[in-house]
Each structure stands twice: as structure tokens, then as C-alpha cells.
Image (tube, grey):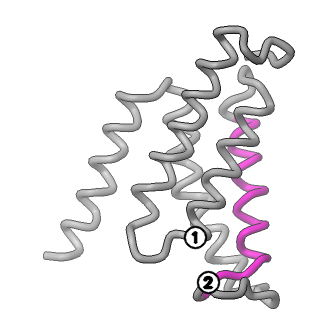
């Protein structure tokens, strides 16, 4: 029963992400959740030597791997967006993955990273950050 609920909540968010964010942002958010999260776990367990104080089972190496993978995802799927949007989205996904422990981070990563990317894209399009391109 718990397994069905866990998988169902993940799919529910994917539907919300696709309907709430721009298509490219939704795709990047979902991929950062799946591929970025997996890379953090794999690299953290395999190469983790430097553990983050006060955070259970979090290695700097895993966090670094996730950030790099999230940046790559951003540059591939958000190539027409500003580099700042990609950086903020990857940074948000990495921070949420790193500090969230008690709540399902697979729900929160795309929610926060997609929201931040969407808001920043909107702010840039209004001309408030006119030196950046969208």
C-alpha cells in the first residue's frame, strides 16, 4: 500500500509541473528530480569522503555531482533561457535535495526549482533584469 502511495504522489506532481510551468521548465524540473537525485546518491555513496556536518548521509561529492548534472540538464533543455535561470534552477534543486530529509524531496525539488525558474523568467521578461537574455 505504501509503495502505491509513494509512486502515485510522484506522478501527481509531474502532472502539476507540466500544467503549471512552461514546458521546458517542467521537463528540466522533472529530469533534475530523477537524474540529478540519482547522481547525488550514486556519487555520494561511491565517492563520498567529505560529509556535511549536521546533515545525515550527505556527502559534498554527491551534492557537487548533482549540481553539475542539473547544470547540464539546464543547458540542454533550457538553452534558450538565461544562464541565470539555469543556475538558479540547478542551485535550488541541489539545495532542496541536500537539506530536505523528512519530507519527500521528489515532490519538493521540481516544485521549488520549477517555481524559481518560472518566476525568474517572468521577472527577466518584464525587463527588470534587462542585461540578461531570455
SS label for mark 2: loop
Left or right of residue 46: residue 23: left
Q: In front here: 118 or 44?
A: 118
First-in-chain label (1 vs 2): 2
Query: Does 32 appear above or below 81?
Result: below
Residue at left 61%, top 54%? 93
- Whether residues under marks 1 and 2 lie with C-beta atoms below 8 angstroms apart, the answer is yes
Q: Quadrant of the N terminus?
A: bottom left
Left or right of residue 81: residue 104: left
SS label for mark 1: helix
Residue 65 among those drawn in magenta: yes
**Mark 1 highlights which residue?**
99
Residue at left 81%, top 90%? 49
**Quarter where residue 43 is shown:** bottom right
Q: Which residues are magenta?
A: 57-76
Residue 63 percent location from the top left of the image: 72, 69
* Residue extending farthest front: 128
* Residue extending farthest left: 1
Q: In front here: 42 or 54?
A: 54
Residue 118 percent location from the top left of the image: 55, 28
Residue 69 among those drawn in magenta: yes
Give how far apart the Cα atoms at labels 1 and 2 are. 7 Å
Q: In front here: 5 or 111?
A: 111
Query: Does 38 appear above or below 21?
Result: below
**Disc 2: CA contacts within 10 A as few (<14), some (14-19) or many (>=20):** few
Q: Quadrant of the C terminus?
A: top right
Residue 9 percent location from the top left of the image: 27, 57
Residue at left 35%, top 28%? 19
Q: Which mark is residue 55?
A: 2
Amino acid at each position: 500500500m505504501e509503495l502505491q502511495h509513494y509512486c502515485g504522489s510522484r506522478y501527481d506532481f509531474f502532472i502539476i509541473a507540466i500544467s503549471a510551468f512552461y514546458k521546458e521548465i517542467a521537463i528540466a524540473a522533472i529530469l533534475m528530480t530523477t537524474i540529478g537525485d540519482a547522481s547525488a546518491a550514486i556519487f555520494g555513496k561511491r565517492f563520498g569522503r567529505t560529509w556535511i556536518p549536521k546533515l545525515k548521509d550527505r556527502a559534498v561529492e554527491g551534492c557537487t555531482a548533482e549540481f553539475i548534472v542539473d547544470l547540464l540538464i539546464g543547458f540542454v533543455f533550457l538553452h534558450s533561457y538565461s544562464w541565470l535561470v539555469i543556475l538558479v534552477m540547478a542551485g535550488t534543486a541541489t539545495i532542496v535535495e541536500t537539506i530536505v530529509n523528512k519530507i519527500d524531496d521528489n515532490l519538493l525539488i521540481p516544485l521549488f526549482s520549477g517555481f524559481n525558474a518560472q518566476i525568474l523568467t517572468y521577472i527577466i521578461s518584464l525587463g527588470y533584469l534587462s542585461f540578461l537574455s531570455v
